[in-house]
Image: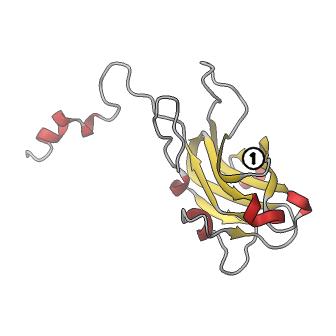
Amino acid sequence: MLPRNNEGKVYPDIGNLARWSVSSWKYGFGLDCLRDDNPETFWHSEGNQPHSITLEFPKRVAMQKVIIYLDQKKDDSYTPEVIAIRAGTSLRDLQEVRQVPFDKPMGWVSFDVTNEPSEDGSGNKPLYAYVLQLVIMSNYMNGKDTHIRGLKIVGPLEEPAQDGTEAFPFISSDYKMYETIR
């Protein structure tokens, strides 16, 4: 479930580019449950708060939205109530860029990584960083452990070339026609 813009274009999933880690997990409910696209499985944190999910990218990337699957009816006090978004060039210089409160979430929730509006007023600016960290600041009913049933990170929409040419000419039909001639 990737979000679309007003024109129906799908935001690209960039989560597969990152190395993922979590602050803690309960056996059988680890990191793989965040990425399996199955809302019946979930990451279950264990231990003292705050809990965190960290994505480390090998190069600086543009991040637009976080898409998270939460189910307050099923998870009750394990459901995050406030998540802080932190970003930086390494784990040592993370800065908080946004806090997101949830009101009894049920299903996929999508939100922009930052609150900074874009120049054209169509949404928010993408965030450029090497590291993105989601920190669960509090849970409903002061719960200690956390359940998150799915998580995706998407980049901004790619703009088509303004002159009508393709961004990568080596995938054009002209290129493909001659690619095997030696």
Q: Alpha-carbon neighbours of circle 1 within 10 Å: few (<14), some, or many (≥20)?
A: many
Question: Which residue is at a point 66% across and 73% down the rendered structure image?
Answer: 30
Determine whether the residue tagged by mark 1 lies in a helix, strand or loop: strand
- State how many labels appear: 1
Position in image of residue 104 (x %, y %): 78, 51
In front: 181, or 21?
A: 21
Q: Residue at x 61, y 68 (%)?
A: 40
Can you say whether 29 is above or below 102 in the image?
Answer: below
Identify the amino acid type marked 1.
Ile
In percent of width and height, residue 97 lies at 76, 40
Residue sticking out furthest to the right? 142
Residue 24, horizontal then vertical, whole percent:
75, 71
On the picture, is 34 further left or further right than 135? left
Residue at image mark 1: 85
In the image, 46 versus 70, the foreground residue is 70
96 left or right of 5? right
Which residue sits at x=65%, y=63%? 149
Q: Is residue 156 above or below residue 151?
A: above
- Residue 140 drawn above or below residue 130: below
